[in-house]
Image (spheres, rainbow, N blue to C red):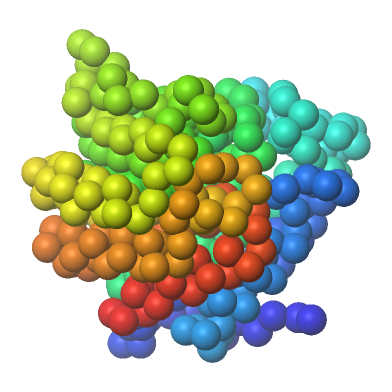
Amino acid sequence: MPLNYTLGAMSIETTVPLAVFHDQRADLHDTGPGHPERPERLPAVVSAARAYCRHLHHPSQTGWDSQIRVLEAVRAVHAASYIDRLQHSCAAHKNYIDVPDSAICPDSFEAAVASAACGLAAAEAVAVTKSARHAFVAMRPPGHHCEHNRSMGFCLFNNVAVAACRLLTTPGIERVAIVDFDVHHGNGTQHLFDARDDVLYISTHQHPATMYPGTGYGHETGTPGTAGAGHTLNIPLDPGTGEAEALVAYAGPITERLDAYRPHILLVSAGFDADRRDPLANLRWDSSTFERITRLLTEVADRHCEGRIVSFLEGGYDLHALAEGVTAHLGVLAEG
């Protein structure tokens, strides 16, 4: 069923508490039968979003409908050789790129561009036109595992990293914080910024000794001897960890680190696979956990970022858990 988008460019006179960005080209990314990161994920997300946003926003509303313009932003994060290789692999009808988990089809490159475009449009709406206080990017494929020059873990472009780099060219945005609550560590995001001090990366995830991709130990705090030293905070969680332990981390060291850093905008890698029902992990969160974490993050954003938050869909593979988690997350963001 066709989705309805808000027509016309958003403006500061029509500021909304929450804008949800989506592009139907995400549906073109066919990962094949049995793959966890499947097209059916997005209807669950879009249905949840419609409880708070009557219309979905399209990247063309902020001028991000040009593939040339989007790829220029993507090249600030990913090697040109990787971008070309991804495009050629899709055109050659290959089944995956780099690792079998990263399944592709002929239209996957277009879907990846659309996903990055939605992230860029959402960031612009919040930080440049200020037409939305919060934004959520309801897109796939996800991004936080993608490295500078290779795909990993279902991810083709690192959408949150692309948006972060673009935001750092915006007047008044000198420090970006990325908080990643996906159950898997965002290795790509960490590695892309671990020598920089203009991005603070914080991640909670199931302990890397028990979970893909095997990175995100507590001692990984940024590249020693570079500006990025001390600008990464990883909090691994043992299998079986529930809401109480998660909230201790978010209300304690995570909030403290964010308050000390004083970011100008907060980006969120919002994976909902820490839910107890998710088939790929072993944490025991539920929708109330995502709600309470989101509330803590909005409090930080209100103190330091003029409330500005852009959230990017990452993982979440049980459809009911995904819908409930997104509903809880957006319910807080929609409060304004």
Q: Position of residue 263 (x, y in %)?
A: 19, 49
Left or right: residue 336 compared with residue 191? left
- Residue 171: x and y in percent read 23, 53
In this rendering, position of residue 226 left or right of residue 188 = left
Quadrant where the N terminus sits is: bottom right
Q: Nearer the viewer, residue 244 or 39?
A: 244
The quarter holding residue 58 reads bottom right
**In the image, is residue 75 above or below residue 289?**
above
Horizontal arrangement in the rendering, residue 152 relative to residue 247 (left or right): right
Query: As rendered, which of 204 and 227 lies closer to the eye?
Result: 204
Residue 281 lies, with reference to residue 131, above or below; the image says above
Q: Which residue occupies 77% across, 29% down? A: 100
Q: Nearer the viewer, residue 132 or 9?
A: 132
Asked if one can make out residue 135 in the rendered structure from this viewpoint, the answer is: no
Which is nearer the eye, 275 or 93?
275
Residue at position x 16%, y 48% in the image: 252
Note whether 300 is above or below 93 in the view shown.
below
Question: How many numbered marks have been drawn onto this rendered protein structure?
Answer: 0
| Image quarter of the C terminus | bottom left
